Image (tube, rainbow, N blue to C red):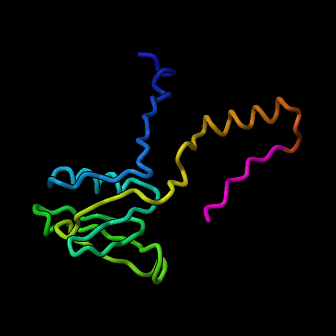
Amino acid sequence: MKPDELEVAPGFAKENLQGQVWDTASEEALRTGLEKAFDYRGDVTITKTDGSKIEGYIFDRRTGKTLKDSFVRVIPASKGGPLSKISVAYSEIAGLAFTGRDPAAGKSWEAWVKKYMERKAAGEKNIENVPERLD
């Protein structure tokens, strides 16, 4: 075993979910989709069984034994801002779509270094990579 080789862990491919509509036909598919939505950094749109829609950021989920005992917690994109939170039971969810922009998609340390090196090679001075605005 070589310690230097252990210091570098392989990365993983991030699934691009932006714009996808998730199949919620089965309990397993719904649970998988909601786990992915929890890890997603953009807004999702939940279509409830009564036809109403909630667009917002899923910041928490509570998984129970049944769909009725499981909940996602959402910060709505409109209506009250981050202080307003909604709980939705999995059993009330008929559809799930990844509608919001993922602000971190395609961003990585490697991409930052590549951009920096390109700018340095072009002769730029006082190089500063400023993050893009989120709004």
Q: Identify the residue at horizontal 44%, vertical 51% (top origin).
A: 18
- Residue 16, horizontal then vertical, whole percent: 43, 44
Figure disc tally: 0
* Residue sitting at the far bottom: 80
Q: Is 115 on the left or on the right of 54, as rendered?
A: right
User: In this picture, which residue range is highlighted in magenta?
Assistant: 127-135
Q: Is residue 125 above or below residue 130?
A: above
- Residue 36, horizontal then vertical, whole percent: 33, 51
Q: Identify the residue at horizontal 63%, vertical 37% (top origin).
A: 111
Q: Is 28 on the left or on the right of 95, as rendered?
A: left
* Residue sitting at the far front: 51
Q: Identify the residue at horizontal 23%, vertical 66% (top origin).
A: 93
- In this orientation, which residue lies closer to the viewer: 58 or 26? 26
Quarter that holds the N terminus: top left
- Residue 9, horizontal then vertical, whole percent: 46, 30
Q: Is residue 88 above or below residue 79?
A: above
* Residue sitting at the far top: 1
Name the main secondary structure of what is drawn in magenta. Answer: loop
Image quadrant of residue 79? bottom left
**132 falls in the magenta region:** yes
Q: Is residue 134 above or below residue 36?
A: below
Q: Is residue 39 above or below residue 63?
A: above
Image quadrant of residue 27? bottom left
- In this orientation, which residue lies closer to the viewer: 78 or 53? 53
